[in-house]
Image: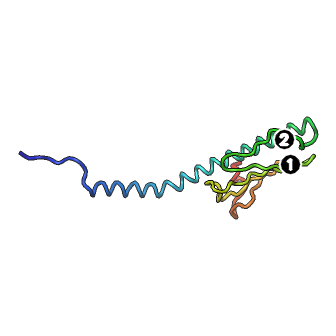
């Protein structure tokens, strides 16, 4: 009576593990950048919403100071505001200890005139690269 062994050999298992390792090495950086791009879009949207809130308040009161309900940020960015009667500057600063702390786009800013920019960004990046518009 001949008995047939079923299953995988050690070599076959090692080859599969090596292939998975190679695929993960290639895919992980792309996935991480995809997550960062989503987080940048989230904070850019949050800053734009806050700017709209300030503009609505200004259209009613004719000043930016005194507005309530500005967002403090999210898990990855802290939003600070510099308000005067006639101007505002919103800044989203990357939080230390998060995956965005060393992001190439740096910190985001938007002004009452609609100027969007980045602070501490990698040289050569444009506003469109980071703000997505």
Position in image of residue 58 (x %, y %)? 89, 39
Position in image of residue 16 (x %, y %)? 34, 54
Toward the left, the furthest residue is 1
Residue at left offset 74%, top offset 56%:
118
Image-quadrant location for residue 127:
bottom right
Instruction: Count the labels in the image.
Output: 2
97 left or right of 65 in image: left
What's the image's color scheme? rainbow
- Label 1 crowd (10 A; few <14 / some 14-19 / many >=20): many
Position in image of residue 38 (x %, y %)? 63, 47
Looking at the image, tell me whether mark 2 or mark 1 is earlier in sequence order. Answer: 2
Toward the bottom, the furthest residue is 123
**Callout 1 secondary element:** strand
Disc 2 + disc 1, Cβ < 8 Å: yes
**56 is higher (above) or lower (below) than 86:** above
Residue at left offset 23%, top offset 48%:
7
- Label 2 crowd (10 A; few <14 / some 14-19 / many >=20): many
Q: Quadrant of the N terminus?
A: top left
Residue at left offset 91%, top offset 48%:
84
15 left or right of 100 in image: left
- Front residue of this view, candidates 37 and 6: 6
Separation of marks 2 and 1 at Cα, in angstroms: 8 Å
87 left or right of 45 in image: right
Instruction: Identify residue for label 2.
Output: 54
Toward the front, the furthest residue is 97
Residue at left offset 85%, top offset 51%:
82
Mark number for residue 44? none
- Front residue of this view, candidates 19 and 95: 95
Position in image of residue 98 (x %, y %)? 63, 54
29 left or right of 114 in image: left
Mark number for residue 88? 1
**Callout 2 secondary element:** helix
């Amino acid at each position: 009576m001949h008995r047939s062994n079923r299953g995988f050999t050690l070599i076959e298992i090692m080859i599969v593990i090596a292939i998975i390792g190679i695929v993960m090495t290639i895919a992980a950086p792309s996935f991480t950048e995809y997550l960062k791009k989503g987080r940048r879009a989230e904070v850019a949207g949050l800053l734009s919403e806050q700017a709209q809130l300030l503009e609505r308040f200004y259209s009613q009161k004719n000043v930016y100071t005194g507005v309530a309900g500005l967002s403090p940020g999210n898990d990855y960015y802290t939003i600070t505001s510099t308000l005067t009667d006639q101007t505002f500057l919103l800044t989203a600063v990357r939080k230390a200890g998060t995956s965005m702390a060393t992001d190439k786009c740096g910190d985001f800013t938007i002004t009452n005139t609609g100027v969007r920019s980045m602070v501490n960004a990698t040289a050569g990046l444009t506003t469109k690269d980071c703000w997505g518009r």
